[in-house]
Amino acid sequence: MGDRLSNLVKRNNAKIDLRKIPNSLEAIEALERQMQEAGEEAPTQVNHYVSRDVYVRELVIPKGVLVIGRVHKYDHVSIMLEGEMLMWTSDKGAFKIKAPFISTTKAGSKRVGFALSDTRFVTAHGTPNVPDWDPCLPDEELKALFTTRTMIEYNLFATKAEQLQLAIPQQPLIEMW
C-alpha cells in the first residue's frame, strides 16, 4: 500500500494493521468485533433518499476512516460518487476503487473500506419485494430490513426464505425513462 498510508490506523487507542485486513467473512467479522470492543464507531454521515420502489442510502466517509458494512440480504447497486478507497471483500480480496465507480453487490456480501480521501458511497435498493418496507422507519430498522450483522444471521434469513418457498428475490431493474 506504499508510503501513502501508515501501516496502522490509530483511533481511540485501537490499532488496525492495514497489511492484515481480512479477506474472509469470518476475519472481517472478527475485525468488526475488535473495533466494537475498542469502542470504535466510524464518524460517518448517513443520508436517505426514497422514491417509488427504490431506497438509496448515502454514506459520507471522512478521509482516514475504516468502515465495515453489514451483510446484505438482497442484490443491489453500489456507487462511489466521490473519493478513493481501499476495499476488501471475501470474494475479491483487497482492491482499490476510485470515483466514479459503479458495481453490483450480491446478497450475502460484506465489505471493509478504508477512505483514502473524503468519500461519498451510495447503495441503491429495489423495495417491491422487501417485506415490511416503510421509508419512515428509523435508521436501525431500515438497516435490519436490508442487512444482517453477521453471516450466520444472513444464512438464517436465507434458509427461512427458502423454507417459505420464497427464493431471495432479485431486485427489479427500475426503468429510468
Image (cartoon, grey):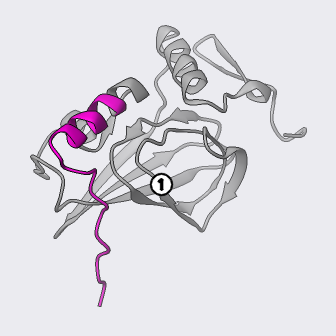
**Horizontal side of residue 88 vs 25, given as left or right:** right
Tell me which residue sits at (54%, 60%) in the image: 80
Quadrant location of the C terminus?
A: bottom left
Q: Position of residue 3 (x, y in %)?
A: 90, 38
Residue identifier under label 1: 105
Quadrant location of the N terminus?
A: top right
**Horizontal side of residue 9 vs 79, given as left or right:** right
**Disc 1 crowd, CA 10 A, few/some/many (<14, 14-19, 20+):** some
Please say whether residue 174 is one of the residues in the magenta stretch.
Answer: yes
Main secondary structure along the magenta-highlighted residues: loop
Q: Position of residue 112 (x, y in %)?
A: 57, 37
Tag 1's secondary structure? strand
Tell me which residue sits at (53%, 35%) in the image: 67
149 lies above or below 164: above
Residue projecting furthest to the bottom = 177
| Image-quadrant location for residue 31 | top right
Residue projecting furthest to the right = 3
Please say whether residue 173 is one of the residues in the magenta stretch.
Answer: yes
Q: Which residues are magenta?
A: 155-177
- Name the amino acid type tagged 1: Thr
Q: Position of residue 169 (x, y in %)?
A: 26, 57
118 lies above or below 81: above
Nearest to the observer: residue 19 or residue 128: 128
**Horizontal side of residue 136 vs 143, given as left or right:** left
Tell me which residue sits at (60%, 68%) in the image: 100
91 lies above or below 32: below
